[in-house]
């Protein structure tokens, strides 16, 4: 197995390459930028890209997906509830002061409960709206790991003051979908360091007190 997570783009989005070296296949999660670097790494590892999985439709996570698809032929999967985010790409780019990337509707929607990933390394899609309406997390049960996008961070949660955000909803999503996972589940967030479900259950200030029960 190959598992590499590294920050890309000006907002340092965590992009993940997950590969089965025996089968020579891989998936990439959240290729927001630095596509030449991602593609070069896939080539170095000798992996054929099978899927491009996007946790939500913000520019720092989806901005490079179409370019990577054109280089590899791999389909893009994004929850259909975030199609409005793609329509706001020019505004998202303006907020950051960057060039608007070319985007396109996904080849398939990441719907709740579906299985994605590689045959040997499958993941279940957990729809976790709140940061955006199409936000999803990817639970790799065989790896005891969840890719959380911008839903849950080490010591924090995703912001909810942008279009499609809902503060009470993100708390409900985290409590019902993520805190239901085992405490030792490793969490790879959309930005920043990894954590565990248990650590966030115990010490995340957004998941304690009355607001966490909204």
Image (tube, grey):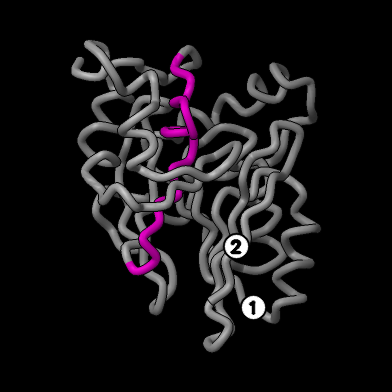
Location of residue 111 in the rendering, given as x and y in whole percent from the top left corner:
30, 49
Callout 2 environment at 10 Å: few (<14), some (14 to 19), or many (20+)? many
Q: Provide the residue span drawn in magenta.
A: 142-160
Q: Is residue 120 above or below residue 96?
A: below
> Mark 2 — residue?
17
Q: Secondary structure at mark 1?
A: loop
Image quarter for residue 171? Answer: top left
Left or right for 210, reference 77: left
Q: Secondary structure beneath disc 2?
A: strand
Q: Position of residue 90 (x, y in %)?
A: 67, 24
Horizontal side, residue 162 vs residue 5: left or right? left
User: In this picture, is 11 found above or below 91?
Assistant: below
User: Left of 181 or right of it: where is 148?
Assistant: right
Give percent across and percent down for residue 62.
Answer: 59, 42
The mark nearer the N terminus, 1 or 2, is 2
Picture coordinates of residue 188, whole percent (x, y):
50, 47
Q: Nearer the viewer, residue 59 or 176?
A: 176
| Residue in view at x 72 percent, y 44 percent | 8
Q: Dot 1 corresponds to which residue?
A: 47
> How far is the residue under mark 1 from the one under mark 2?
10 Å
Judge whether residue 210 is colored magenta: no
Dot 1: within a 10 Å radius of its alpha carbon, few (fewer than 14), some, or many (20 or more) residues? many
- 176 on left or right of 147: left
Tell me, yes or no, whether the two marked residues, 1 and 2, touch with CB atoms within 8 Å: yes
Q: Quadrant of the C terminus?
A: top left
Q: Nearer the viewer, residue 113 or 156?
A: 156
Q: Residue at x 54, y 88 (%)?
A: 22
Q: Nearer the viewer, mark 1 or mark 2?
A: 2
């Amino acid at each position: 197995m190959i598992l590499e997570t590294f920050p890309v783009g000006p907002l340092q989005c965590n992009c993940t390459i997950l590969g089965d070296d025996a089968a020579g296949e891989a998936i990439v999660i959240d290729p927001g930028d630095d596509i030449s670097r991602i593609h070069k790494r896939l080539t170095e590892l000798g992996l054929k890209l099978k899927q491009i999985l996007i946790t939500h439709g913000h520019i720092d996570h989806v901005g490079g997906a179409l370019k990577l698809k054109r280089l590899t032929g791999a389909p893009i999967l994004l929850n259909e509830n975030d199609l409005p985010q793609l329509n706001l790409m020019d505004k998202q780019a303006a907020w950051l002061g960057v060039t608007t990337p070319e985007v396109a509707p996904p080849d398939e929607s990441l719907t709740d409960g579906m299985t994605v990933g590689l045959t040997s390394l499958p993941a279940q899609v957990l729809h976790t709206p709140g940061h955006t309406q199409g936000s999803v997390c990817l639970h790799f049960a065989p790896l005891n790991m969840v890719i959380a996008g911008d839903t849950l961070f080490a010591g924090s949660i995703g912001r909810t003051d942008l279009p499609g955000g809902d503060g009470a909803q993100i708390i409900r999503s985290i409590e019902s979908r993520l805190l239901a996972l085992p405490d030792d589940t490793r969490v790879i967030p959309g930005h920043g360091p990894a954590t565990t479900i248990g650590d966030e259950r115990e010490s995340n200030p957004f998941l304690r007190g009355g607001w966490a029960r909204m």
